[in-house]
Image (cartoon, rainbow, N blue to C red):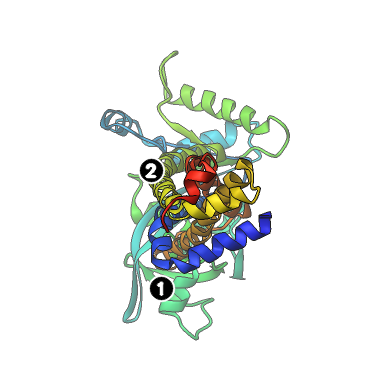
Amino acid sequence: MGFSEAVKVALQSLWANKLRTVLTIIGVVIGVASVIAVITLSNGAKMFVVKKIANHGSDVLTVTRLNPVIFTGEEYLRENKRKNITFDDYLYLKQACTRCLTMGAELSSSGTVVNGKQSTTNTEINGWTANMVEINNLNVVEGRAITPMDDDLGTHDVVVGYDIVDNLLPNVDPIGQELRVDGEIYTIVGVGERQGEVFGQSEDNYVDMPLSTYLHTHGEHESLNISAKAGMAPGALDNAIDEVKALMRARRHDLPGAEDSFGILTNQTFIDLYNQIFGMFAAVIIGIAAISLVVGGVVIMNIMLVSVTERTREIGIRKALGAKRQDVMVQFLIESAVMALVGGFFGVVLGIVVAKTVTLLVSFPSAVPLWAVLLGLFVAGGVGIFFGVYPARKAAMLDPIVALRAEL
């Protein structure tokens, strides 16, 4: 029996016993689907992180009061005792940092925006210095961005996201329109590029105003985030980080040998955080998937043993006609592998459907890499071959005379 004929016989056997086939491959389907769904979602999240990093700029560093990742309550309590980063700190760094090409500062909070009887809630209110537009690569598609003059004069000019336009100013030219932000009146001078939703949260529900205005209307009790561009020259970012760290330690009187009383974020910070979170998540899910695959493999082995028993006489006839042990073993291995590959195929489809459903329901980004599909099929085929060896060997070792005496 040739390879193609063996595959054909295997498919006919699966089709003839549909219920048994479904029950046999369900473990493989669940295992492969879990792997594909995890890889698809994590790959989509990685692409999202990379996109956000690209928007932030690979040569940007940000000075914050708190570190971005806190794992223990002790760390949280210790870091919350740190002094705020103030506007004077920003002015000092802006003047003293020789390795920073440009520097900006920002503050953010959540607030309410009102126009007439319409309003939005949980809107991100950002206070920016003018150069944060360049640092954050904000693309203003209507009107203009915040300017240094806005910041110097403390104007009530704002740039808004498309959620504000769509919900509060439908079918109206937004430029020049007035809004109330946390009770204060502001004039729209620009609209940012539409960004859509991520993780179920809109990226277009924001209002950007001059930092000086934000400090006047919202108070100066919050800690600033200070961002700086270092340039793309080799080693420029590391050199800028070293200089900023030295300047901040000196200004905040951090003792020699003591840890920094502030945090410095770069793109690598977000990449490391992503790898850590999704690494743990993927490990757990893939562990569960491995158990499903093992269970599926054991079921396949049991069904193949039943198949050997049912086809004992057929094996005896094949051997009597000259079939070698190797021929019989290859036939049963092919049947086992085909069964697992069918399960793998449906597992790949189910995994993609699950991932895309999650994307539709909560806007979690997903992307299906080709290598993941091939990996799923390869793993399924490997499971079929591994757990099919014992039944195939048992079939190959049958004595032809004893096999021919078997009852039908």
Q: Nearer the viewer, mark 1 or mark 2?
A: 2
- In whole angstroms, how far apart are the C-alphas of marks 1 and 2? 57 Å
Please state the horizontal and vertical placement of residue 334, each as a whole percent of the image.
Answer: 58, 51
Q: How many marks?
A: 2
The quarter of the rendered structure image containing the C terminus is bottom left
Q: Nearer the viewer, residue 43 or 320?
A: 320
Identified at 35% across, 35% down, the residue is: 70
Please state the horizontal and vertical placement of residue 268, each as a whole percent of the image.
Answer: 55, 37
Disc number placed over residue 50 in the picture, else none:
none
Q: Quadrant of residue 111?
A: bottom left
The residue pinned by badge 1 equals 179
Q: Nearer the viewer, residue 295 or 205?
A: 295
The amino acid type of the residue labelled 1 equals Leu
Is residue 152 shown to the viewer in this render? no
Please state the horizontal and vertical placement of residue 397, each as a whole percent of the image.
Answer: 52, 39
Q: Nearer the viewer, residue 359 or 61?
A: 359
Quick check: 173 above or below 378?
below
Decide if residue 137 is on the left or right side of residue 181.
Answer: right
The amino acid type of the residue labelled 2 equals Ile
Residue extending furthest toward the top: 256
Is residue 198 shown to the viewer in this render? yes
Identified at 52% across, 50% down, the residue is: 380
Q: Earlier in the sequence, mark 1 or mark 2?
A: 1
Decide if residue 19 is on the left or right side of residue 4.
Answer: left
Identified at 44% across, 72% down, the residue is: 164
Disc number placed over residue 291 in the picture, else none:
2
Q: Secondary structure at mark 2?
A: helix
Q: Secondary structure at mark 1?
A: strand
